[in-house]
Amino acid sequence: MPASISKAAIERARAFVRANARPLDRAYLDYMSPSGGDETAFDRVIGELERYQTPEGGFGNAIEPDIRSPAPSAIGTSIAFQYLRAIDAPADLPMVQKAIDYLVRTVDRTAWVWPAVDARVDEGPHAPWWAPGLDRFRGYVFNPTAELLGYLYDYRADVPGEVLQGVTSTVLEALDRVGRLDSAYELYCCMRLIHTKALPADVRDFLERRLPASLVAADPDDPHLNLMRIAPTPSSFGYELVRDGVARQAARLIAAQGDDGGWRPGWEPWHVKAHQEWAGEITCRALVGLAAHGFWAD
């Protein structure tokens, strides 16, 4: 196990988040704090997410910092649900109901996938890798569709059976065909699916048989792959298969902290504000991941 991140380094990182992160990520860090978040953190996370939800029910408005369009997108909505799942947002929350309705309305009922973005992404600046029609994601069947499927199961009471059946069949059949996932982003999405508490037993059994090959092959030196997000806690499915990689990455992460307390994106900036927002988000997630895996100093 690598040396833990020191209390002083934790405080520097917290100060960086307070000074540089979006209010959403500041509230999220307060909620996830191992020392116990303040009682307002849940409401603050929801309040900040409201800034990103659109009248259509999906999420846009730069919730994904590299997509500055005000329009909703499937990828933006998946990011919102990552926060909603983390805080155990209830099914009767209007925000959740509107977002689930958006997903039900916008799924492609022929292919049973959600394209990550559509033409409306051009309504604002965006990184070149988010150009509309640029399918780098194997028909979107894993990224973002597999992940979004998990959120449908989280709130399945509001989801038509044909949608659950269609999307589930599409994802499982695709995973059966490809065998092993060689994209970090596709693996993230499939792991978020298997971390779904309400996942049907037969779907879970299938994933438990198929995903280990991808976990065994996961490269801790892949700059796109954060194993602490693949297995968010030591009790998560697949943790034992990536445990050594988690320790290696944690050691590197602790050593790479900036003098100002933050961590920066590993890619070239294309937009000043997006880069700053990513730095805040990455620093927030670094603290949460290190804490969840026992790498905070006592």
Image: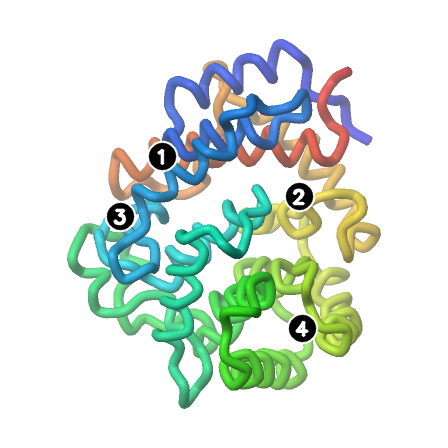
Q: What residue type is labelled 4?
A: Arg
Q: In this view, does 52 lie to the left or right of 177?
A: left
x then y, percent, for residue 189: 56, 62
Q: What residue type is labelled 1?
A: Glu
Q: What residue type is labelled 2?
A: Met
Tell me which label, 3 or 2, sits earlier in the chain.
3
Height in image: 276 above or below 124?
above
Q: In this view, does 74 lie to the left or right of 68?
A: right
Q: In this view, does 28 lie to the left or right of 53?
A: right
Write down the residue under mark 3: 61
Tell me which label, 3 or 1, sits earlier in the chain.
3
* Res 180 label: 4
x then y, percent, for residue 107: 40, 77
Residues at badges 2 and 4 in contact (C-beta under 8 Å)?
Answer: no
* Res 228 label: 2
Q: How far apart are marks 2 and 1 (CA)?
A: 20 Å
Residues at badges 2 and 1 in contact (C-beta under 8 Å)?
Answer: no
Tell me which label, 3 or 4, sits earlier in the chain.
3
Q: Distance between the residues labelled 3 and 4?
A: 34 Å
Q: Is mark 3 on a helix, strand or loop?
A: loop
